[in-house]
Image (cartoon, helix red, strand yellow):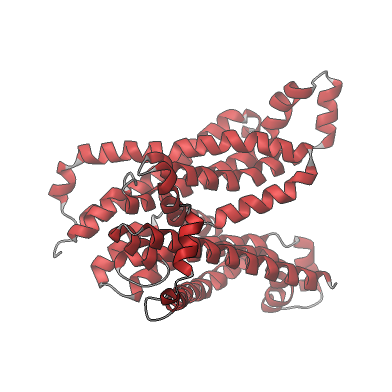
Amino acid sequence: MSDWLDWDWLASHGELFAALTGDHLYLSILPVIGGLLISLPLGLACVRWPRIYPPVLGTTSVLYALPSLALFVLLIDFTGFEPLTVMIPLTIYTLSVLVPNVVDGLRSVPDPVRQAATAMGFAGIRRLLQVELPIAVPVIMAGLRVATVANISLVSVGAIIGIGGLGQLFTEGFQRGFPTEIAAGVALIVALAVAADALLVIVQRVLTPWSRA
Amino acid sequence: MTIFELTWRWMSDPEQWQGPDGIPARLIEHLWYSALALAIAAAIALPLGLFIGHTRRAAFLAVNSANAARALPTLGLLMLVVLAAGVGLLPVLVALIALAIPPILVNTYAGIRAVDADVVDASKGVGMTGMQVLTKVEMPLAVPLILLGLRTAAIQIVSTATIAAYVSLGGLGRFIVDGLARRDYELVAGGAVLVALLAVVTQAAFVLLQRTTSAKVRGT
């Protein structure tokens, strides 16, 4: 406890860090992708049938309020001590953040743009994919960034039930009374979140080349 | 047996409703940590957000560092402070406050920022001082976003106060952590359902508060 950062320990555990970072990415990114894949059709449905939006929004905001640790332990009964137990709640959180953004993004498409697209012969799926979705990208990406950063940070709570990626450094370090290990976990998680966020900013720039003017 | 049957069996046992390890005592502990953390976080983040929104000073720095702070894993922060300062209320408060400041700060700033510049100009035009513009014009108009920030912070605090139990404090998380350690699934399920209920009730309370204040702003 006297020396707070044990550099020798840090230097000799590179492989452990790499393995846990890999687990951590897998546990946090897959739910982001899953949440995106669910929220796109759900958001589209809410735009097409506005009447279902209030109940959908109500449900997602209640789901968002559910504590992660509570969901993890409740799911153990169904999915066991498996990665899925951590990934299902994270997918739900991603979904809760993304659905409103998908709806707002699609609603932000100006009517004249939609009419112009129709006049040019874009209809149905093609208009959606080539005109409306690209215009909605900035709003959807804003939600995606929030969800990604939140997931990367939240995965570590899973360490309490033994599935937490880098969070394992917290529980182990705490049991051993070894601050270096916890600090390494915090630093790696923040670095991972910042890197993922930066990557999403780049993806957004690639997806919306017109905004770079 | 399903979660709800387990929870029901646990909750309907009269023994769970008394003593220092009973549901009421743990609920009060949980609410106490949460309210204290929210109050301190608001005392720091509200004035700061108002200042940045009003003066537009250091906005880029503040908003970006608040966003980066969202990536801080609360569990790790909590454990680090426990190792540094010992077990007690302090580490839990530090972790929860760090969690609550970003949403309050960012939303307060955004709320003030979103006030129509013409309205601010008009207020100055009728002779209001900077302080009057802030308290009588900008703040009332920013109330909906400020409340949204407080609501997000409150929900996150109530949810996360659960992990205080991991570093031997009380609160509803005690049931989950003790239940996991003793492999007592009834206790785990009961604790989890209670925390989830509390989070949903907190959310509903804030939604109600938002509706009443927005009705007042509209004068209906």
* Percent of width and height locating residue A96: 59, 48
A165 or A191, which is in the foreground? A165
Q: Tell me what residue is drawn at x 86 percent, y 22 percent.
A: A119
Residue A108 visible from this viewpoint: no
Left or right: A142 as drawn, with respect to B133 = left
Q: Residue furthest bottom?
A: B19
| Quadrant (top left, top right, bottom left, bottom right) of the C terminus of chain B | bottom right
- Count of number-bearing discs: 0
Q: Tell me what residue is drawn at x 43 percent, y 58 percent.
A: B189
* Percent of width and height locating residue B16: 42, 74
Left or right: B120 as drawn, with respect to A72 = right
Image height check: is B38 above or below A28?
Answer: below
Image height check: is B54 above or below A173?
Answer: below
A206 or A109, which is in the foreground? A109
Image height check: is B34 above or below A85?
Answer: below
* Percent of width and height locating residue B57: 56, 63
Q: Tell me what residue is drawn at x 54 percent, y 67 percent.
A: B198
Residue A193 visible from this viewpoint: yes
Q: Tell me what residue is drawn at x 30 percent, y 69 percent.
A: B168
**Residue A25 lies in quadrant:** top left
A201 or B98, which is in the foreground? B98
Left or right: B182 as drawn, with respect to B9 = left
Image height check: is A181 above or below B187?
Answer: above
